[in-house]
Amino acid sequence: MDDSNLSNKPALKQFKPTPARAPLNTNKGIIATIKHRCFNNIANSLLTICVAVVLYYFIRHVLDWAVFNAVFTADNRRQCLAISPDGACWAGVLSWFNGLIYGRFPIDEQWRVNVGVLLALVWLLPLFSKRIAMRNFILLTLIALYPFIAGYLFLGGQFGAQLGLFHGAMTCLALAFLAMIYANWLLSALGHKGLNELFVPLFSRLFKHRIQLLSCLAVWLPLALVFAVAISFISLEPVDIDRWGGVFLTLIIAGFAISMAIPVGIVLALGRRSQMPVVHWISLSVIELVRSVPLITVLFMAVTLLPIFLPADMEFNKLTQVLVAVCIFAGAYMAENIRGGLQAIPQGQFEAAATLGLGYMHTMMLVILPQALKMMIPNIMTSFISLLKDTTLVSIIGLFDIMLMARNIANDKDWIGLHTEPLVMISVLFFILCYSMSQYSLNLEKRLKVDH
Amino acid sequence: MIQPSVSKSSTNTSFLNNSANRAVILQVVVLAAVLFGLWFLFANASDNLNRLGMSFGFDFLQVTAGFDISWSLIPYDPGMTYWRVFLVGIINTLVLSFCVIFVGTIIGTVVGILRLSNNPLVSQMARWYVEVVRNVPLLIQIIFWFTVVFSTLPAPRKSFHIGQWLFLNNRGLYVISTESTMSWGAIFAILGALVISLYALFYWSKPYLRLTGSRPTGFYIGLALLAITSCWCVWFFADSMTLSIPTLKGFNYVDGAFLPASFGAAFVAMTVYRSAAIAETVRAGMQSIDRGQHEAAFTIGFSRFQSLRLILIPQAVRSIIPPMTNSWLAATKDSSLAVAIGFPELVSVFMQTSMNQTGRAIEIIFMVMGFYIFISLLISYLLNKYNESIQDKVR
């Protein structure tokens, strides 16, 4: 009935909305925003004022202490206190700065630490170039080969004598490989195909590429030989491992943990997801047991139990024991991250890989793990951050990492009782490192957003 | 219809290419490797122990420890056994972690909610609190609070005090306490009965309140009766109690209850650290709720606090519980870091002092790790159960 009525009536006038009124001037601009969000009612206004006052006094106090009343040049703490009793005494931290960075590494040999760190960065640099192929391979060799160079640089000694011939050979191979990476990069930058083609056979089982493998070795081995000849003329002053310390040691432990965490984690995670009961239960128990105990007990265990459980004639230093402990610990945590990623991969991916005729290794290496790792980047970064923070625990068992070096300043007779400033200093250092890592991971997360 | 026939003969699977065979072989190899590894380790261990003239066994637990522990809740003196030391360590660890979890969860929840505040000043302050605390290692924070704050408090003679009840100095906190002639069990039983009857009273009157909007008359009578009973109980307890007032004797206070400075530092640092982690958890949980829920609560006229308490938090809890469980487990594990400032928790008294004295590394590490594993499994089991129940109820 309504319909017929409507249809008889003349057509309704077209609805024309009146244009919206412009917002009041009072609702625009910074002042209005502040008014709306900070002073919209009495309670909120009081809250704002309280917070502002507290913040003001806090910041002023901190700035007064850290900057305006601080002493930057003094010979000892007494002098510091005489100049400004309620300011920070940065002079102490500055005079120990070298120790904080390098630990007790001999001053004349510290260039080796710099060179070592620089080499790691140089190794990583090609990763930022989009031209170079097989970037994963560069990362892999950084983990597998770079430690030999680092070991040679940081420990020193006559080449091939103290550290053994195998170590020497690996150092040369590593250096040759670095040279090849750069040759590769250079060639690809010049528009050639590059040597990267030569690395392919290392991964592939196709025999027709054997020629390429041989040609790759034909470049690599002579290059290594050249390096061997070059290095054998150099003899570095041996440095005792006990003299490693400071930021340097922290970076070594963290770097080792971070680079070992992913391989160990992948093995454990795949083991846990395995259909085979023995493998599944072994991985499961390792992961769960390690994850349910504190790191400090694992460290104590490594320091006290490794000498008991390994042959009596094996030599140990604390750092190796700690590295073993940290490696297992980091691996177990990483395994859970990676397992999360593996679980999030849709079943269709496995089936598609099976349809293509890929075996287990190929399915995992080419299809599943790249996706799982990419998906888990934020969690993996969080793990790395907590690993970096956890390295401070090695100071409890007496390694002179940055934490123990900083605490040692207070025992120096010139700077006795100087606790606050070193602690603040290393807190700021850790904050900068960890905060930038977390921001970087947020950035990555946004960039690599994977939707399924 | 013609069934397509698949010829089985075309697949030439050799023995090694059969996946079932492969699985068996691989597992046998893995098992053999693990067993060999274990045998290798234990053979070495027995060799090494023999060489050093040590033995394996838990008989050392009955030996007198002979060292003092600065703080323990259960009676302890140096004449007691290592088993007692283990118990003291466990209790101290549990007390510290419980306090941290309790206070840290409250602060963390508040900070997490503040981070979502409309007020930019408040939300930014909460944000930077979380960022700064999360990105500085816990160990640095513990040592900072210990050396910079708690150790610089005045000496016992000049301690801060509130009347004669509470004294704060660089040794720790001394509070007035009571000593009772009654057993604590009886006192707790009576208090428990009072609390339960109060709860029952509210529970009983709830349907009537829902129906009519006011509580039944019996509720007020019951409340009055309870008040009278509790007053009488307090008077009765007070009669059996003597106050123990901290008094300065020589260089230190005696009597009263005592909390060492190391406990204070560990507690404050860990609470702050945990609260930042929990704040992030809470924020993520709150943000996981659909925005419509905020708006709906706002539309029916709920205040911000009401909508939080009645609409948002009950829904957020569902997604918060699993990460919160992990956070609590982490707090329990982190309590071991108090070893760095000498708080007598499990790692400190058992893994350091006792191990140095007895040299029984294997047994002690086995016991300590067993304790942590037990706690982890227990907490995750209980919270999984609770999680299941809450998930069912809400969905």
Image (spheres, coloured by chain):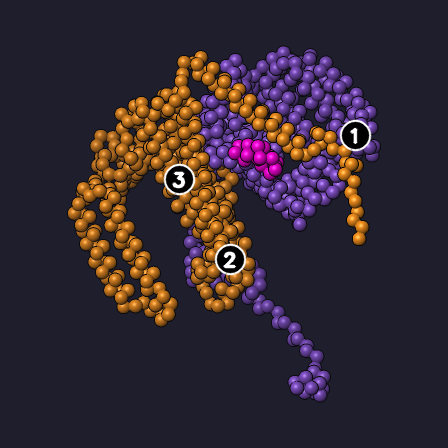
Side of B219 relative to A74 (left or right): left
Up the image or down, A91 lies above or below A450; here it is above
Question: Residue B97's mark?
Answer: 3
Total number of numbered discs in the rendering: 3
Q: Amino acid at mark 1?
A: Leu
According to the picture, the residue beneath numbered tag 2 turns out to be: B395
**C-alpha separation, residue under disc 1 versus residue under disc 3:** 58 Å
Q: Nearer the viewer, residue A356 or A3?
A: A356
Apparent colour of chain A: purple
- Number of the front mark, 1 or 3: 1
* Secondary structure of residue under mark 3: helix
**In the picture, which chain is orange?**
B
Q: Position of residue B58 (x, y in %)?
A: 37, 24
Q: Amino acid at mark 3?
A: Ser
Tell me which numbered mark, 3 or 2, is placed earlier along the sequence.
3
**Magenta stretch, residue numbers:** A270-287
**C-alpha separation, residue under disc 3 versus residue under disc 2:** 32 Å
Q: Residue at x 43, y 56 (%)?
A: A47
Q: Nearer the viewer, residue B285 or B32?
A: B32
According to the picture, the residue beneath numbered tag 1 turns out to be: A206
Q: Amino acid at mark 2?
A: Arg
Up the image or down, B238 lies above or below B139; here it is below
